[in-house]
Image (cartoon, rainbow, N blue to C red):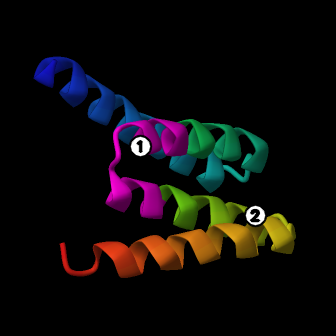
Amino acid sequence: IAENLADERLIANALGRMGAVYESFGKNKEAVKFYSSCLNLVVKLEDRRGEATAHANLALVYTRSGRMKKAARHYRKYLDLARLTENK
């Protein structure tokens, strides 16, 4: 089970990095797909720091895309999670 968990953490990390690559090329739709997949996986893993990072990444992509309502929603979730994890 621990080996499987480690694999899922590596997958989540890879998904986040792929999102960053697509974002750097200005391919925001693809970046959102990878960041969203990463978010779904870190939520499953109960990785609050990973969840906060995924929300921050999504917020940045949505901000750059001019989708401010979605950006604000992800910034709020990021802030809430950042407060929860600051002492851990």
| Relative side of 70 to 82, left or right | right
Q: Label 2 crowding class (10 Å Cα cut-off): few <14, some 14-19, many 20+?
A: many
The answer to whether one can see residue 18 in this image is: no
| Relative side of 17 to 66, left or right | left
The image shows residue 33, relative to residue 49, as above or below, that is above
| Labels 2 and 1: the sequence-earlier one | 1
| Quarter the C terminus occupies | bottom left
The answer to whether marks 2 and 1 mark residues whose Cβ atoms lie closer than 8 Å is no
Badge number at residue 62: 2
Q: Amino acid at mark 1?
A: Val
Task: Find residue 37 and report its horizontal and vertical position in percent.
Answer: 57, 36
Bounds of the magenta segment: 38-53
Q: How much space separates mark 2 and mark 1, taking CA atoms?
A: 20 Å
Task: Find residue 26 and report its horizontal and vertical position in percent.
Answer: 72, 53
The quarter holding residue 81 reads bottom left
Viewer-nearest residue: 68 or 64: 68
Q: Main secondary structure of the magenta part?
A: helix
* Residue at numbered disc 1: 42
* Residue that lies at the very extreme toward the left in this rendered image: 2
